Amino acid sequence: MISIAYSAGLFGIDGYLVTVECHSARRLSCFEIVGLPDNAIKEAKERVRAAAINSHLPFPQNEIIVNLAPADKRKEGSSFDLAILISILISGGVFEKPELLENSCFIGELSLSGEVRRVNGVLCMAVAAKKAGKTKLFVPQENVNEASVVKGLEVYGVKSVNDIVNHFNGLKELSKTEYTPSNENDAFSYPDFCDVMGQVAVKRAVEIAAAGGHNILLIGPPGTGKSMIAKRIPSILPEMTFEESIETTKIHSVSGILPQDVSLIRERPFRSPHHTMSAPSLVGGGKIPQPGEVSLANNGVLFLDELPEFNRTVTESLRQPLEDGKITITRTAGRITYPCSFMLVAAMNPCKCGYYGHPTHACTCKKEDIKKYVSKISGPLLDRVDIQIEVMSIGYGEISEKRKAEPSSEIRKRVNKARAIMQARFENDTTENGVKITCNAQMESKHLRKYCTLSNECSSLMETAFTALGLSARGHDRILRLARTIADLGGSEEIQPNHIAEAIGLRSLDKKYFN
């Protein structure tokens, strides 16, 4: 007898439907699973058998062969346990009306007692089940919130195998879980800019970076507030769209770091890895390619504190993701592409001791040591950082100021207004890689020619800066993108000379520190 149940697998952040076929025949008792299963699936034989026995469900003492189709695609993880047992129970006649299960998809790991345990990537698999035409999805109770986000799919949270048996046999029906948008986005969990005293120029630069999605490098001596400012940047970034929330939630779900009580990530992620990390940890990797920090920061901020302390190999691996907005990881197990459209925020001291160029504190480093320290950051990487701003020490008067600084909510209003202008401008535009453009930092050459036309006065100013600063073609384009963002913040349709001048000023530290 052949019985069929449906589950879903993962390939990167994309799910796909898996047909679980069970052949049961009255022969010498054996249990085999085929269809390119990994070790976790092979071990499912013992989990499934014990779960059925301890749930007081009949387990056929027959020859049982379970096939996971498509059989040419490698299957990984323990999420197929539930569907495997359901297919065996169907062949054993446990369900009175097995035809009722045809439009259902089952996802979950089994314990030996028959309980259904949480698995990673349920949102991705729920989307795949919906695309495949399934109307009902049965997932672990702990995963039910994220799965309920998918519209047009009836989602049921189950605690044990008996819940499903009782549901389909009409003994005790499970209740559907409906997705209700939460108010998580109404209150920030990130610190507020009202705590940052002084640093007016730096806060202006950060506002421009947030509005246009530009990468930014903060350079200054210790204790000037570089990390403090960086950690507050997510509080002024625009609200996430539903599509961005879904994409970010998928990545966090696959990585297993999505909180149990969160159905959809509504705050832009902020990732701050330690400088001892490896390149695969940053861009992703492993035998089975998993998302790295650049993908976990997708649609948010990747903060690299003490940038020169990172291994050169690690920082250089950022070059391609910063340009393309996605990262492709190739391993023997497969070739997987993860999105990684993030805003890079980096902070560093100007030298090893931290006081090079300080007005009152003497630097103890030798010239060759200073050169060696800053040379850890390559020119191509710096070229991809739109804004380079110096963060200097503030005076006692600013520290002792009793009046609070401008709060994040006010800055965010201006950022949202500028971002709305950009979204209207780029409504039908995409990059060469097919990524939809949402902010000025993502513009390519063809978009610059279309949206960043310059007057004769602006062109003359750009020519002077290009020659004096020794800009590359990429550096030239970066200044144009910055000027476009500054114009949008000011509500100007045309780029003015003062916008060009301010953009040039935000990239003027190349010669001071890195020449």
Image (cartoon, rainbow, N blue to C red):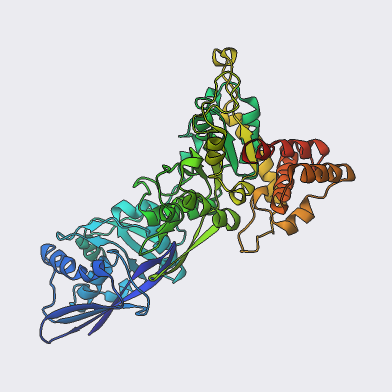
Where is 189 relative to 440, above or below? above
Residue 69 drawn at (x, y percent): 34, 78
Q: Is residue 34 left or right of residue 239?
A: left
Where is 74 relative to 473, above or below? below
Asked whether the viewer can see residue 275, the reply is yes
Q: Is residue 395 left or right of residue 424?
A: left
Asked whether the viewer can see residue 494, the reply is no
In the foreground, 500 or 492? 500
Residue 404, picture quadrant? top right
In the foreground, 258 or 274? 274
Number of marks present in the image shown: 0
Residue at point 82% right, 42% down?
464
Residue 494, picture quadrant? top right
Image quadrant holding the C terminus, namely top right
Image quadrant holding the N terminus, namely bottom left
Residue at point 78% right, 55% down?
450
Residue at point 16% right, 64% down?
51
Residue 124 drawn at (x, y percent): 42, 61
In the foreground, 206 or 306? 306
Residue at point 69% right, 56% down?
444
Residue 395 drawn at (x, y percent): 59, 16
Where is 124 relative to 276, above or below? below
